[in-house]
Image (cartoon, rainbow, N blue to C red):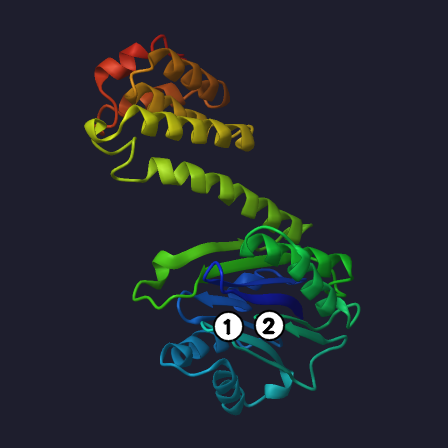
C-alpha cells in the first residue's frame, strides 16, 4: 500500500530507493538498501524479511531475477506482495501479486523502476518514472522528484503519512556502512514527501559543514602548520555559504568562527561568534571550551573577545 522508485546511477556509482505511503514508518518496512549489494522495495502487504534475505543472496552473486524468484518461492502468500529489486550491476526485477489492492502499476526503464499499489490511478508509476528521468541533480534529488510527481498524480488513494529515502554506493565493499549517501525517514507528517525533500536539501548543506568539521587532518582538527592560508580561506568561505543556506541554524556560523580564529583572524571570528550567539546564547561558552579539546588556544579565544557572556 505504497509507491516506490528504485534506480541505479552508473555514472555516480550509486543506487537508491524512495517510498511513500499512508502508513507510519514506511522506511522501517518497505525501503531497503545496502552499499555494494542492492536496493529493494517490499510493499503491498509487505514482507520485511525480503530486505535482509534478499541482500544475503545478492551478496553472494545472485542476480536480481534469481533473488526475487527465490523470495517468492519461499513465501506462503506471494500473491499479496509487490516487490522491486535492483542489484549492484543495475539489473531490475519486479513482481506484483494478483491480490495486491488496485490500482496497481509498474513502469520500467534502463536502471530504473517505479511501482505502486492502492494507488488512485494505475498511471502513477509511469508519471514517477518520467519525472525521475527529467529531473536534474543527484540521485537523491531525482528520487524525491519521482515521489513528488507520484503524489501529484494521485499517489496512495488513502492519503499521505510517511516517506523514506536510501541511497548507497554500488561498488564492492567490506564496509557498507561507510558508503551510505543518504538514509532519511519521515515517519509521520502531513506532507511527508515535501518534508523528505527538505531533509535532502538540508543534508546537502550539512555535508559541506561535515567535510570541514570532522576531517581529522583538516583546518579544524589538523595541525595548523599543515594547513595553509588558502585552506583556511576556502573552508571559511564554504561555511559562510552554508550559514546563509541554514538560516536560523547557527551550526555553520559557529564553526566559521572557529576556522577564522585558528587562521588568526580574531575580528572575523568575533563577528561569527556574535552572530551564532544571537541564535543560541550558549555558543560563546562552547567556543571557549574548545581550548580543552585542543581545537583553539587561549590566545585565539582571547583574540575573538569581547564575546557575548550572557
Identity of the residue drawn at 49% across and 78% down = 50
Is residue 172 or residue 46 the one in the foreground? 172
Marks counted in the figure total 2
Identity of the residue drawn at 53% across and 75% down = 85
Residue 110: mark in rendering: 2
Q: Quadrant of the N terminus?
A: bottom right
Is residue 266 or residue 81 the one in the foreground? 266
The mark that comes first in sequence, 2 or 1, is 1
Q: Position of residue 158 (x, y in %)?
A: 75, 64
The answer to whether any part of residue 270 appears in the image is yes
Instruction: Residue under label 1, please give it.
Output: 90
- Against 259, residue 54 (above or below) is below
Splitting the image into 4 quarters, where does residue 2 fall? bottom right
- Against 80, residue 255 (above or below) is above
The answer to whether any part of residue 147 appears in the image is no
Splitting the image into 4 quarters, where does residue 201 fall? top right
Q: Position of residue 228 (x, y in %)?
A: 27, 27
Left or right: where 9 falls relative to 236 = right
Is residue 162 or residue 258 the one in the foreground? 258
Q: Position of residue 101 (x, y in %)?
A: 73, 78
The secondary element bearing badge 2 is classed as loop
- Against 96, residue 37 (above or below) is above
Do tag 2 and tag 1 residues touch (Cβ < 8 Å)? yes
Identity of the residue drawn at 28% across and 11% down = 302
Splitting the image into 4 quarters, where does residue 298 fall? top left
Amino acid at each position: 500500500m505504497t509507491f516506490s522508485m528504485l534506480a541505479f546511477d552508473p555514472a555516480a556509482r550509486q543506487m537508491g530507493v524512495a517510498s511513500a505511503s499512508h502508513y507510519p514508518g514506511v522506511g522501517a518496512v518497505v525501503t531497503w538498501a545496502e552499499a555494494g549489494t542492492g536496493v529493494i522495495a517490499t510493499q503491498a502487504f509487505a514482507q520485511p524479511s525480503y530486505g535482509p534475505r534478499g541482500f544475503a543472496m545478492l551478496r553472494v552473486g545472485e542476480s536480481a531475477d534469481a533473488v526475487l524468484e527465490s523470495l517468492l518461492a519461499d513465501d506462503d502468500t506471494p500473491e499479496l506482495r509487490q516487490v522491486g529489486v535492483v542489484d549492484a550491476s543495475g539489473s531490475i526485477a519486479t513482481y506484483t501479486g494478483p491480490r495486491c489492492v488496485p490500482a496497481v502499476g509498474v513502469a520500467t526503464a534502463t536502471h530504473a523502476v517505479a511501482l505502486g499499489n492502492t494507488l488512485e490511478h494505475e498511471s502513477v508509476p509511469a508519471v514517477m518514472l518520467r519525472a525521475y528521468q527529467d529531473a536534474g541533480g543527484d540521485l537523491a534529488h531525482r528520487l524525491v522528484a519521482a515521489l513528488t510527481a507520484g503524489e501529484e498524480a494521485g499517489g496512495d488513494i488513502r492519503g499521505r503519512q510517511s516517506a523514506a529515502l536510501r541511497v548507497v554506493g554500488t561498488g564492492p565493499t567490506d564496509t557498507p556502512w561507510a558508503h551510505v549517501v543518504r538514509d532519511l525517514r519521515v515517519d509521520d507528517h502531513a506532507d511527508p514527501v515535501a518534508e523528505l525533500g527538505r531533509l535532502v536539501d538540508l543534508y546537502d548543506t550539512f555535508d559541506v559543514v561535515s567535510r570541514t568539521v570532522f576531517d581529522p587532518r583538516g583546518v579544524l582538527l589538523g595541525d595548523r602548520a599543515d594547513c595553509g592560508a588558502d585552506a583556511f580561506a576556502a573552508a571559511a568561505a564554504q561555511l559562510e555559504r552554508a550559514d546563509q543556506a541554514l538560516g536560523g541554524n547557527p551550526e555553520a556560523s559557529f564553526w566559521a568562527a572557529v576556522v577564522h580564529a585558528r587562521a588568526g583572524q580574531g575580528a572575523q571570528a568575533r563577528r561569527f561568534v556574535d552572530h551564532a550567539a544571537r541564535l543560541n546564547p550558549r555558543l560563546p561558552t562552547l567556543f571557549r571550551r574548545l581550548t580543552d579539546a585542543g581545537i583553539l588556544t587561549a590566545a585565539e579565544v582571547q583574540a575573538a573577545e569581547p564575546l557575548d557572556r550572557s
